[in-house]
Image: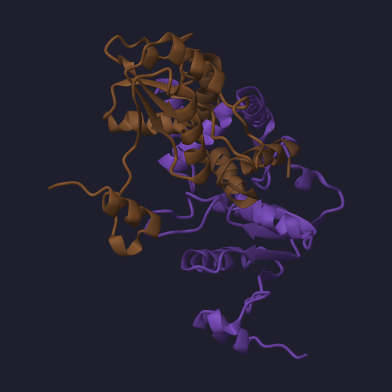
Chain colours: A brown, B purple
């Protein structure tokens, strides 16, 4: 096999969710329609490389710089800040169209095992932001995992004195969730936090 | 989300084996290490686009042009031709290092349902090649599927008068195959074609 193809397969095989075999399949697919598909991909990557930057304020990835289109949007509620672990979580919340405030991308969660402390995350920038902007609410939209909850606890302690109200996402039975298949933790929370019909 | 990112995710989501969600995960992974990973991918694609061509003789994809490195190799047995459906099958056989002849990539199989007849494949070029080169053996290394076997039958009829010997790959129990899990067709063939120990 030509070393150029071999190299391209290697590059793809290191992508999350792909391996050597699936990468080979993708490259052969691309090679079979070189002019259309491969050049389209090349152009799309070039466009992203040329235009996409991290927002200086929230950390979102966007073509508008130095502030992203959410941070620049005058219709957004600048008194409400939603803290997310990463950009994909931000996009997930944006897709719901249920939130109208602004965001802050933390860059991950605290993790003792992986040696990730507050200095590895954007905690400092977050504290500065909360000191400066007088937020009426800070939502900790972190994962419901051990690391996510450790981080939420840590952020609560750090930000408590700086902001008016700190909230977290509701916990309970997910839409379409069958009780039988739910883990005990979720069921216990759902019972404890039951609401009046 | 920036339209550039959205477009790149779309491009990736149409790749075989990927969907919208896995494409998004890949793009976020690439964006998180833009300088290293994304530019490496860009360069790898550019290299392939610039250098890789279809071999004029066999149809293999290679950086050497107009003939691929297999067709050019003086150590290859030019009397033996292995007909494969596509380039990935050629690469699969090459990886075994068990074959020393040359190849011919058909470009698919005959398929009544998909409207693929001999004119959609490289059957004409194959017939010309067999008329010109006096092959001592032509191996039909086609899939053991309905379309693959229809194609093999068709090619046998077309090439019979042109070449000395036409062979097909052996059928039977695959390595590591447990009889219990094999389909009946394979078992029946394996019993009928049993060999002396």
User: Does residue A143 appear left or right of residue B132 in this picture?
Assistant: left
Depth order, front residue of B133/B34: B34
| Furthest residue toward bottom | B196
At x 47%, y 49%, the residue is: B120
Q: Can I make out residue A125 in this image? A: yes
Q: Quadrant of residue A131?
A: top left
Depth order, front residue of B177/B79: B177
Q: Residue A136, percent across and down?
A: 32, 18
User: Does residue A69 appear left or right of residue B102 in this picture?
Assistant: left
Depth order, front residue of B83/A188: A188
Q: Residue A25, percent across and down?
A: 57, 48
Depth order, front residue of A23/B154: A23
Instruction: Look at the image and tell me in which quarter the N terminus of chain A lies.
Output: top right
| Furthest residue toward front | A161
Q: Residue B19, percent across and down?
A: 43, 43
Q: Residue B45, percent across and down?
A: 63, 30
At x 56%, y 33%, the residue is: B29
User: Does residue A129 appear left or right of residue A182 in this picture?
Assistant: right
| Furthest residue toward left | A197
At x 44%, y 36%, the residue is: A142
Q: Quadrant of residue B9?
A: top left
User: Does residue B127 appear left or right of residue B24 in this picture?
Assistant: right
Q: Quadrant of residue B113?
A: bottom left
């Amino acid at each position: 096999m030509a070393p150029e193809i071999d190299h391209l397969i290697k590059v793809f095989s290191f992508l999350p969710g792909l391996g050597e075999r699936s990468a080979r399949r993708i490259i052969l697919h691309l090679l079979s329609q070189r002019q259309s598909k491969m050049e389209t991909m090349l152009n799309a990557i070039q466009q992203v490389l040329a235009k996409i930057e991290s927002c200086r304020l929230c950390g979102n990835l966007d073509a508008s710089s130095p502030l992203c289109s959410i941070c620049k949007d005058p219709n957004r509620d600048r008194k409400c800040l939603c803290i997310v672990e990463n950009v994909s979580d931000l996009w997930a919340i944006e897709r719901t169209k249920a939130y109208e405030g602004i965001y802050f991308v933390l860059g991950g969660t605290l993790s003792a095992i992986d040696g990730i402390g507050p200095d590895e995350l954007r905690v400092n920038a977050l504290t500065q932001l909360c000191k400066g902007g007088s937020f009426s609410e800070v939502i900790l939209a972190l994962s419901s995992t051990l690391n996510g909850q450790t981080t939420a606890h840590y952020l609560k302690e750090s930000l408590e004195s700086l902001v008016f109200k700190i909230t977290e996402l509701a916990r309970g039975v997910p839409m379409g969730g069958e009780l039988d298949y739910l883990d005990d933790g979720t069921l216990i929370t759902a019972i404890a936090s039951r609401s009046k019909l």
